[in-house]
Amino acid sequence: MTLNQIRALVADDLATVDRLLSEQSRSEVDLANQVARYIVEAGGKRIRAVLVLLCGRALGGLRHPDASFMLAAVIEFIHTATLLHDDVIDDSEIRRGRATANKVWGNEASVLGGDFFYSRAFSMIAEIDQSEVTRILANAANAIVEGELLELMHARQIELDEDQYLTIIEGKTAKLFEASCEATARIEGANDEHTQELAHFGRLLGAAFQIADDAIDYLEDNPEADKSVGDDLAGGRLTLPYIYALREAPKEDREFLHHAIQSGQREHIGEVCAIMHRSGAIDYAWKRAREFAQRAQSHLNVLNASSWRDALEEVTEFSVSRRY
Ligand code: FPP
Ligand code: MG
């Protein structure tokens, strides 16, 4: 299934979430309005919102629709805040198919735009008014920042191994996927077993999603890309394909990779992509992503069979077969 087909299953719910995103993006301050409208209108995959809606439906129906829609919007806002900050850190130029906010308004406005979304998200969490949901989201936000700091600490450190990489992506990406599923289960009043299983599902799916993202960053000639590629190299970020190639490629290629990641020069991207390809690093990353996706799917067994559960499986399939 394509992502559009998956989204079509929850089209009405998503339309409500989109309305909330627009309403909640409004501000009395013109610059906040401009940055917020720009990035919200650009869309994005909305995959975290889709997870909230599908998990809610799969657990027996959106019993508290207002809270679920608000949660979906909150998660998208936290995600958008992280992207605004991330694009400043990575000095990225393209996001969601358009120039990044940092390129349009500069770094200061982009950081503050991220802060706007982040703080607005916490006002919305207050409206959900469930202490368990607040705890899950506050912990997730904290874990994201820690994951990002860990990544920064290890920039250009070629000793970084797979386990350390997995710890980084668990914080920076998997945690918000986990929170989407876990908080939804809480809103639905699911029992502890269902809640834990869905939390595991989200965490493993999030890891699969980020590994795929890191493979996509080294795909040459990828017409589907809707954001800057080669940023990981430029920022000295050791991601899974790079870690694999630094370990497995022939000596000459390993030396080149070593030099390329230390210098962070974008002109090396073509040769780096070629090495990634011929060393099997890209294949390896996709294989690992699929393993995580399969492990994620095994946790869906706790749910009764339904078209919603099938759709959650489709989300995992999409996450590791996409090229954008
Ligand atoms: C994308 O990584 C980045 C993240 C998933 C997390 C970024 C988080 C921060 C910058 C901390 C700010 C946190 C809050 C709560 C406001 P990537 O660069 O690998 O992905 P990309 O290819 O989409 O840029
Ligand atoms: Mg980035």
Image: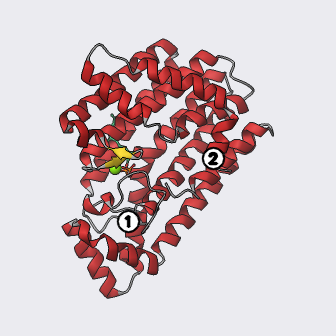
Q: Which residue is mark 1?
A: 161
Type of the residue with mark 2: Val
Type of the residue with mark 1: Asp
Query: Element type at marker 1?
Result: loop
**Quarter containing ligand 1?**
top left
Front in this rendered view, residue 55 or 35: 35
Of callouts 1 and 2, which one flags the residue occurring earlier in the amino acid sequence? Answer: 1
User: Which color scheme did the rendering employ for the protein?
Assistant: secondary structure
- Image coordinates of residue 98 in percent, x first then y, are 36, 44
Residue 60 is left or right of residue 275, and the answer is: right
State the residue at coordinates (73%, 24%): 61
Alpha-carbon distance for marks 1 and 2?
28 Å
Q: What's the mark number on residue 115?
A: none
Residue 81 is left or right of residue 298, and the answer is: left
Query: Element type at marker 2?
Result: helix
Residue 272: image quadrant is bottom left
Q: Residues within 10 Å of mark 2 (few under 14, many from 20)?
A: many
Q: How many marks?
A: 2
Is 95 above or below relative to 304?
Answer: below
Residue 193: image quadrant is top right
Residue 61 is left or right of residue 43, and the answer is: right
Q: Is residue 62 visible?
A: yes
Q: Is mark 1 within 8 Å of ligand 1?
A: no
- Image coordinates of residue 70 in percent, x first then y, are 53, 20
Q: Which residue is mark 2?
A: 315
Is 1 above or below relative to 140?
Answer: below
Q: Residues within 10 Å of mark 1 (few under 14, many from 20)?
A: some
Q: Is residue 147 visible?
A: no
- Image coordinates of residue 183 in percent, x first then y, are 56, 28
Q: Is mark 2 within 8 Å of ligand 1?
A: no
